[in-house]
Image (cartoon, rainbow, N blue to C red):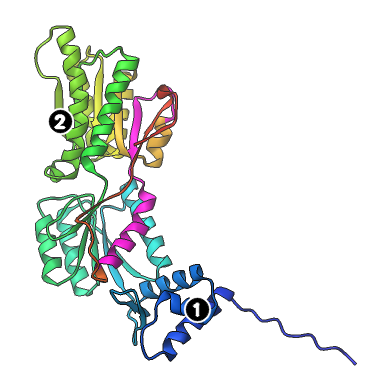
């Protein structure tokens, strides 16, 4: 006689606990508190809390102002629209990847449309989000001229709007403190000039983005160029020189244009040393590096960028690179925080008008350390 073996049960313990909580709420005629659910299910309070928050985010539960949870009859999966800055910009792609992962983890449908670094395309994408009746729009586009039009379209459709890095009317802002990241980039340049060149500075250059002139790039460059220009002005006073010490140029955040602008500038000033360059993006900074290398001026130029994209980090690690640092905007943190902010807006919770992410300054071998917290 053969002995029968019990069948193996392929169960997921945490899922079973989640279903116990859901079934308890189904059988109740009224809402329950976290404490009541914990007492009646005998599941750890931490697990109960996390399960309830997951059901809340997925739309299966609602929470009243007094903290009680109740079952929602027909949960609706939220759908967010994301207008990415450009699939060809590394930082933009890093933000997109982070947002895709976060939306998948929280069960939110995400429609991603590429703004292609172009205002007209961003306008068409805004219309597409309205036609799709998304629950919330996250807009990452650079053109301040179309920002009010995009914001008006989204607001007119009654859709909440989050603006990434570039403020838009009617929108909740999310991103770095643009002035602060620029200021710290400028401090880095000034410190480099003092420790490496003995404070001998001739020029402070800013590679700007005129399309964002009233917002992100302007604030970044305002802070960066101001600090670098102070170093240049001090050096000029020391040698009793007069004239301009700082220049801002519209590089549009693009590599080729930045390279050409810096090439032209360096050719007009072939003998000048002590040139500090603050770039609004790492892509722009890498263009400046290309120009400096082409003219073999590495010893006399220092560059700081923004975003800490992989290619820039590799460049910063080189001992002979003119790219001495970059400010990391922590792109990997954007997705989870944007999803959390979006869900808070949809739930009717009060949110701050400006939501800043953390950043840090990353420097090269010249500083004696790889990074310096902001």
Quarter of the image for residue 155 reads bottom left
Figure check: 313 above or below 340: above
Figure check: 89 above or below 32: above
Residues shaded magenta: 317-345
Q: Secondary structure at mark 2?
A: strand
Q: Is residue 369 visible?
A: yes
* Residue at mark 2: 248
| Quadrant of the rendering where the C terminus is positioned | top left
Q: Is residue 280 visible?
A: no
Q: Earlier in the sequence, mark 2 or mark 1?
A: 1
| Quadrant of the rendering where the N terminus is positioned | bottom right
Residue 364 vs residue 57, the one in the foreground: 57
Identify the disc placed on residue 39: 1
Residue 144, x across and y down, in percent: 12, 50
Q: Secondary structure at mark 1?
A: helix
Figure check: 342 above or below 373: below
Q: Is residue 212 magenta?
A: no
């Amino acid at each position: 006689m053969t002995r029968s073996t019990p069948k193996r049960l392929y169960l997921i313990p945490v899922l079973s606990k989640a279903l116990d909580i859901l079934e308890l709420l189904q059988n109740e005629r009224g809402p329950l508190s976290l404490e009541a659910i914990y007492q009646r299910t005998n599941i750890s309070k931490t697990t109960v809390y996390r399960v309830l928050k997951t059901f809340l985010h997925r739309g299966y539960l609602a929470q009243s102002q007094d903290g009680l949870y109740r079952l929602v009859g027909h949960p609706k999966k939220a759908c967010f629209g994301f207008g990415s800055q450009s699939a060809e910009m590394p930082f933009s792609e890093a933000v997109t990847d982070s947002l895709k992962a976060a939306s998948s983890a929280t069960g939110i449908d995400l429609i991603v449309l590429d703004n292609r670094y172009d205002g007209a395309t961003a306008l068409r994408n805004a219309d597409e989000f309205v036609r799709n009746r998304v629950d919330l729009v996250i807009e990452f586009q650079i053109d301040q001229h179309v920002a009010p039009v995009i914001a008006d379209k989204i607001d007119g459709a009654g859709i909440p709007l989050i603006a990434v890095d570039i403020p838009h009317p009617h929108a909740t802002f999310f991103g770095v403190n643009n002035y602060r990241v620029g200021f710290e980039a400028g401090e880095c340049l000034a410190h480099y000039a003092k420790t490496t060149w003995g404070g001998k500075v001739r020029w402070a250059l800013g590679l700007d983005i005129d399309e964002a002139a009233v917002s992100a790039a302007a604030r970044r460059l305002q802070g960066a160029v101001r600090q670098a220009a102070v170093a240049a002005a001090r050096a000029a006073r020391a040698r009793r020189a007069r004239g301009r010490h700082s220049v801002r140029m519209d590089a549009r955040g693009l590599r080729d244009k930045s390279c050409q602008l810096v090439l032209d500038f360096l050719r007009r000033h072939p003998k000048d040393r002590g040139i500090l360059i603050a770039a609004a993006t790492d892509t722009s900074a890498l263009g400046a590096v290309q120009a400096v290398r082409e003219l073999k001026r590495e010893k006399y130029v220092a560059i700081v960028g923004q975003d800490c994209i992989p290619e820039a980090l590799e460049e910063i690690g080189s001992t002979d690179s003119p790219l001495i640092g970059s400010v990391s905007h922590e792109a990997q943190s954007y997705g989870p925080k944007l999803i959390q902010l979006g869900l808070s807006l949809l739930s009717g919770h009060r949110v701050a008008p400006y939501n800043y992410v953390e950043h840090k300054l990353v420097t090269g071998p010249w500083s004696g350390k790889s990074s310096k917290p902001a």
